[in-house]
Image (cartoon, grey):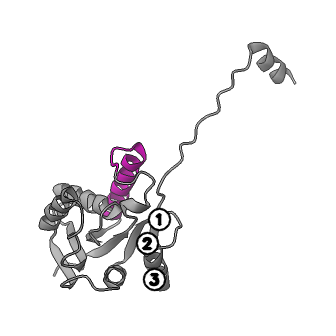
Amino acid sequence: MRAQAITCAFTGHRPEKLPWGDNEQDPRCRALQERIADAVEQAYLAGFRHFVCGMARGCDTWFAQAVLSLKERWYDVTLEAAVPCADQARRWPQADRRRYDAMLAECDQRTVLYDHYVPGCMQQRNRYMVDHCDLLLAVHDGVSGGTQSTLTYAFSRQINVVILPLVVEKVETPCYNTPQTDIKEKTEL
């Protein structure tokens, strides 16, 4: 008998809430994608095998891509698409719809909550993910919205949560252009 897979879900911001918008070439976006991939890898190493994604644009997309990349290396990884409504991608730009369809085709499981959009279906999808996970990875900048609501719900359910920063500020070593004599004087004190 096979042990039950430990489940990890994900929540994060859409491009409209990201400082770089849709520009995935932005270095901050690339760095975030790497942090997401690293977090997925760490979840796998910690024993998580089943991953649930809400399949929205932005952070959800990068999470799904990271899991699909992990699936190429590990046979026991599964990806579930938690789709709020069957027509979720209907109004998206064409390139995003193609990407969505390609990722959806690679998912091991699809859970579609509603046939078409109804008010509250996105929140129901988020609750579904929290109710079916043991760990929630999140990209959150502290601003209220769907990600914040999902985190609040996860905390109320006592789900383990890992929050990935949206942007990591690079800490630079100060550079002092001090004449050599000033350095000598300071070290003699």
Quarter of the figure that contains the N terminus? bottom left
Q: How many marks?
A: 3
Q: Which mark is residue 95?
A: none
Residue shown at 28% from the left, 61% from the top:
61
Q: Which residue is mark 1?
A: 140
| Residue 119, quarter of the rendered image | bottom left
Quarter of the figure that contains the C terminus? top right
Callout 3 secondary element: helix
Measured along the vertical axis of the image, is residue 12 above or below residue 28? below
Measuring from the top left, give residue 83's x and y in whole percent: 24, 76
Of marks 1 and 3, which one's residue comes earlier in the chain? 1
Measuring from the top left, give residue 116's x and y in whole percent: 20, 83
| Alpha carbon distance from label 1 to label 3 | 14 Å
| Residue toward you, 77 or 10 | 10
| Residue toward you, 77 or 81 | 81
Of marks 2 and 1, which one's residue comes earlier in the chain? 1
Q: Is residue 71 visible?
A: no
Magenta residues (range): 23-44
Left or right? Give the position of 165 relative to 4: right
Left or right? Give the position of 26 relative to 83: right
Q: Is residue 99 visible?
A: yes
Residue shown at 69% from the left, 25% from the top:
176
Left or right? Give the position of 97 relative to 182: left
Measuring from the top left, give residue 100's x and y in whole percent: 19, 63
Label 1 Cα crowd, 10 Å radius (few <14 / some 14-19 / many 20+): many
Q: Which residue is mark 2?
A: 147
Residues at circles 1 and 3 in contact by the CB criterion of under 8 Å: no
Q: Which residue is mark 3?
A: 153
> Could you tell me the amino acid type at mark 1?
His
- Chief secondary structure of the magenta portion: helix
Residues at circles 2 and 1 in contact by the CB criterion of under 8 Å: yes
| Residue 33 on the magenta segment | yes
